[in-house]
Amino acid sequence: MGSKKPFDDTGAAPTEVKSVASTILTEFFDVLEKSEGFEDVATKLRKVVLDDGVFAEPSIRVAMFPDDS
Amino acid sequence: MIRIDKINIKEFRGIRDLTLDIKGDNFAVCGPNGTGKSGIVDAIEFALTGNISRLAGAGTGGLSIKAHGPHVDCHNKPEQASVTLDVTIPSLGNKKAQIYRTVKSANAPEIKPADKDVITAFDGVNLHPEFVLSRRELIRYVLSEPGQRSKEVQSLLRLDDIEKLRGVLQKIANACARDLSGLERSEKDSVTNLLTALDITQLTKKSVLETVNPRREILGLAPLTDLDANASVKDGLTTTAAKAPGRVPKVQATADLATLREALQALEAAPFKQACSTASAKTTDLSEQGTGTRPILPP
């Protein structure tokens, strides 16, 4: 298992719990954000997908290719 | 993680009234078929998520929690079908809490104490419905074809969102791949045309600027200092851009063509040819006078 445990037995305050899908997508966007040239795209995609919960192709396209809109 | 201390199930699935005081320990349920073992698992899942995965998904059409959650003798009384869990939350310093949910209000559990940290802890469990794996799900995974196994894993871990995003990104990638060859050809042609126009062999920023700036100086334009995506070697140049031809009304065009045809016919007529011959002869005379072979007569 990963190092981030949503709950532990130490009595510490609970960290934010995400679904498996959200955790995987967050990790994906973190890696994408560190890739040269993809910083802005990663930020915009993260907002559309994780914050807004939108998976429609037009919204994803706008996030990836803002100049085309 | 939460530890279940006590389970109380009333009129739920095949269970009329059952209390299990398990004190946060692991436990196993065994018994003959049809005695309600799966009902206990359903009750725990229902209390924590408001859902029963066995009643949802493929092959469960027509089943619902509202209709099939309550005990068969209480199917018209969803308010009596309830599950109560007394739990301990280790991450909150072994804080005790209780969650109570009825089939009638499956989406509105009563949580005591209704503290923010307790609600957050229960929400965390709700975000991981995969904590319940039914026998059907496990068997379906074991029996699935190798090519379908990834889909079964996605189903078990509720990875629908991943698949949705993957599908959209794949679709966009395919569309980009289709457009790429045409764009690459266009880029190659443009580079070739630019190299020819500037009479240079390599397309570099330095070579372009060194070639363009002297020409811009001749035109009285300021030199370019950089070439970025928005730069144009024609920056500052006022040109009379060719306007797109306007639309010509068909009636007007027909009339113009008729006039042109008449004019052409007039050029073919005898009077015009005679006039041309006369003009030609006079021109010859003038030419000869100019060379001095004939005296210039006074008018």
Image (cartoon, rainbow, N blue to C red):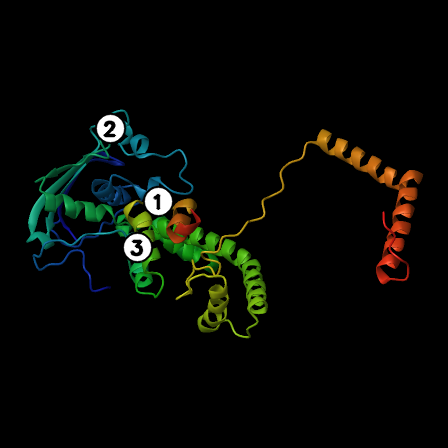
Residue B78, which numbered label?
2
Amino acid type for the residue under numbered disc 2:
Pro
Query: Measuring 75% from the left and 34% from the top, which residue is drawn there?
Result: B256
The chain letter for the residue carrying disc 2 is B
Q: Which kind of residue does numbered mark 3 sit on?
A: Thr
Residue type (three-letter) at the residue carrying disc 1: Val
For this orientation, the residue located farthest to the bottom is B201
- Report the residue at 85% width, 50% height from top: B298
Disc 2 + disc 1, Cβ < 8 Å: no
Chain letter for mark 1 = A
Farthest residue in the top direction?
A: B76
Q: CA distance from mark 2 to mark 3?
A: 46 Å
Q: CA distance from mark 2 to mark 1?
A: 34 Å
Does residue B258 appear left or right of residue A26 in this picture?
right
Q: Tell whether A4 sits left or right of B192.
A: left
Residue A54's disc is 1
Q: Residue B287, image x and y in percent?
A: 86, 57
* Residue B66 in the image: above or below residue B225: above
Left or right side of B206 for B125: left
Q: Which residue is mark 3?
A: A43
Residue drawn at the location 91% of the way across and 59% of the way down:
B294
Q: CA distance from mark 1 to mark 3?
A: 14 Å
Q: Residues within 10 Å of mark 1 (few under 14, many from 20)?
A: some
Percent coordinates x, y for residue B88 in the rendering: 10, 49
Report helix, strand or loop for mark 2: loop
SS for dot 1: loop
The picture places residue B234, in percent across and down from the top left corner, at 49, 58
Q: Nearer the viewer, mark 2 or mark 1?
A: 1
